[in-house]
Image (cartoon, rainbow, N blue to C red):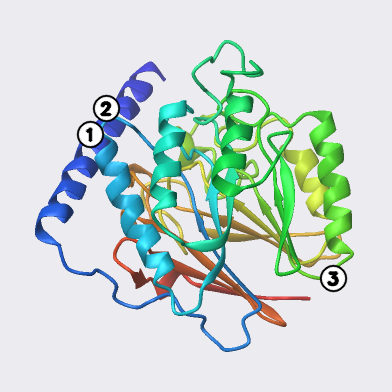
Amino acid sequence: MKDLLTKKGMLRAVTIVITDLLVLLMMVVSPTPRTVAKIADAQADCRLSFADISDTHLRDKPAIVFQTLMNLGLSDMERAEDRLDALVFNGDVTEGGTVAQWELLKGVLEKHDAADKIFLVTGNHDNRGPNRENFNDPDNGAKAIFKRYNRSIAGRKVSQMYYTDSVNGYSFIVLGSEDDSTDAFLSKKQLQWFAAAMKKAAAKGKPIFVFIHQPLNGTHGTPYTFDLDRDADPDEGGIGAQSDQVLKILKKYDNVFYFSGHIHSGFKKEGNPIGAQYASVEFLKNNKGNPITLVSSPMYIFFDITRGGHMELGCGWVTEVYRNRVLLRARNFVTGSWLPAYDEIVALV
């Protein structure tokens, strides 16, 4: 295992260097507009459209790499023919949860008008914070910083790492870990809140969108996809200890869409020849036998070839909601191009 961790660390370091070089090359050789196909609704009766990106891992050294990739992606979003109703950053927004890194995000977002609403989801890297010894430090702890930047970036006052909001009448439920571990810790209070939020959202009779950085245990190829170890603990790469409790709540309702990131894999529809079998969009059955849709977002900044799938800088999802279906559209926001081979149409029940 020690050798494996050493190899993983080396691979990540090499990936970061390659990414930096690719971004610098893009800046030099590609000064012209990159949009191939502007973001536009697939059909005229779209009722909700939002972008979801994950694992931006904002680093302030060098800041130019993050700023370049985010500026390109946000420019693509704000040039949309059909404006996005929301943009979700689904965890590991920053590399270390520092004020400097959150300020970089704030500065980039202030230069663009990408969507009507911004959603920030905490990830394990965000929860490290500048005072890792005290997650709840009222001034310098990760919780205080997350709350502060939800207010200053998204204009949303939150009191916890979890919250809910409505977009065009559709419920967006954000869950978040309450400590700095790699997996997620969801307190009893948060689980009770989640159960109540799901019940209230279901009363609308519309699809429910749930966002959390970590996937459910054993989905999207975990634990292998996350740890690259066939003997890894089954909880590795997933929520962890509270996964079954979250799933139990999800299974009570129809038309649930669960978005996660964390595992750094690319867009995938079939088995991964270098590791576990997985897909970016997977389905579990709820208590009625109807599907729960699990959506894994690729890593936006550093693509990790060891985890398989379609790897490009700047990828994420555009989700469109219609009367009787939801369309999940794979997109590269940096190049401004659709990747229709990975799209998924989900019928509503």
User: Which residue is most to the bottom?
Assistant: 44
Which callout, 3 or 1, points at the residue further toward the start of the chain? 1
Relative to 230, residue 330 above or below = below
**Which of the 4 image quadrants contains residue 39?**
bottom left
Q: Which of marks 3 and 2 is in front?
A: 3
Is residue 310 visible in this depiction of the protein?
A: no
Quarter of the image where the C terminus is located: bottom right
Disc number placed over residue 205 in the picture, else none: 3
Give the structural element (helix, strand or loop) at label 1: helix
Which of 85/53 is in front? 85
Asked if the residue under mark 1 is in contact with the one under mark 2, i.e. CB atoms within 8 Å, the reply is yes
Instruction: Please tell me how crowded label 3 is: few (under 14), some (14-19), or many (20+) other residues with Cα within 10 Å.
Output: few
**Residue 206, percent from left and from top:** 79, 70
For residue 217, what is the image quadrant?
Answer: top right
> Callout 2, which amino acid?
Met
Classify residue 163 as left or right of residue 272. right
- Dot 2: what SS? helix
Name the residue at the left extreme: 29
Whether tag 3 and tag 2 are in contact, CB under 8 A, the answer is: no
> Which image quarter is the N terminus in?
top left
Residue for badge 2? 10
Q: Which mark is residue 90?
A: none
